[in-house]
Amino acid sequence: MASSTFHTTSPDAFSKKVFDCIIVGGGTAGLVLASRLTDDPEISVGVIEAGSSAAADEPTVKIPGHGARTVGTEYDWKFETVPQEGIGGRKLPWPRGKMLGGTSAMNLLVWNRAAREDYDAWEELGNDGWNYQSLL
C-alpha cells in the first residue's frame, strides 16, 4: 500500500492544481475514498472540505465526552428536521460535522446500535449473513 500525503492549501492554490479526482467532502467516506484512490501513486486526489482542518486541535473535538459541545458551533452545519407531526410539529436538530472528519469528528467515540429491522433489511436485500443476530 502506498502512503498517502495530505496537505492543506489555500483555495487559490487548490484551484490552480490539476487532480485526477476531486472529492467534495472531507468526512469519513470522502477521506476513505481519497485514501483508497491514492493507494495508486499515479492518481492525484483533491479533497474539498467546507469546514476547518484545524478542528482536530479543538478540545471539543479531540476529547472523548465533549462531543455534544460541538453541536450548534461553527463545526456543525446546524441542520434540522422538517416539522415532526408526532411531537407537535417541532423540528429537531440534526447535527452534521462541518470539519475534516465530518460528523464522525463530532461524535467522539459515540456508537449507537441500529434497530433490529435495519440490520435484518440488509440481509433481505440479498446480503446473506448480514442480519441483526449475526452482527450482534
Image (spheres, grey):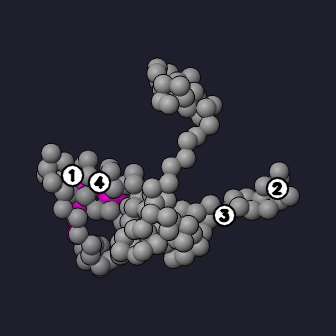
Q: CA distance from mark 3 to mark 4?
A: 30 Å
Residue lying at 27% horizontally and 72% vertically, measured from the top left: 8
Cα gap from disc 2 to disc 3, whole angstroms: 13 Å
Residue type at mark 1 is Thr
Tell me the tag on residue 38: 1
Of callouts 1 and 2, which one flags the residue occurring earlier in the amino acid sequence? 1
Earlier in the chain: of badge 3 and badge 4, it is 4
State the separation of the CA atoms marked 3 and 1.
36 Å
Q: Is residue 34 left or right of residue 100?
A: left
Question: Bounds of the magenta span?
Answer: 17-23
Cα distance between the residues tagged 1 and 4: 6 Å
User: In screen coordinates, is 32 left or right of 89?
Assistant: left
Q: Which residue is mark 4?
A: 34
Callout 2: helix, strand or loop? helix
Toward which corner of the image does residue 24 lie, by quadrant? Answer: bottom left
Whether residues under marks 1 and 2 lie with C-beta atoms below 8 angstroms apart, the answer is no
Q: Amino acid at mark 3?
A: Pro
Q: Position of residue 92 (x, y in %)?
A: 71, 61
Q: Amino acid at mark 4?
A: Ala
Tag 2: amino acid: Ile
- Vertical relation: 114 (above or below) 73: above
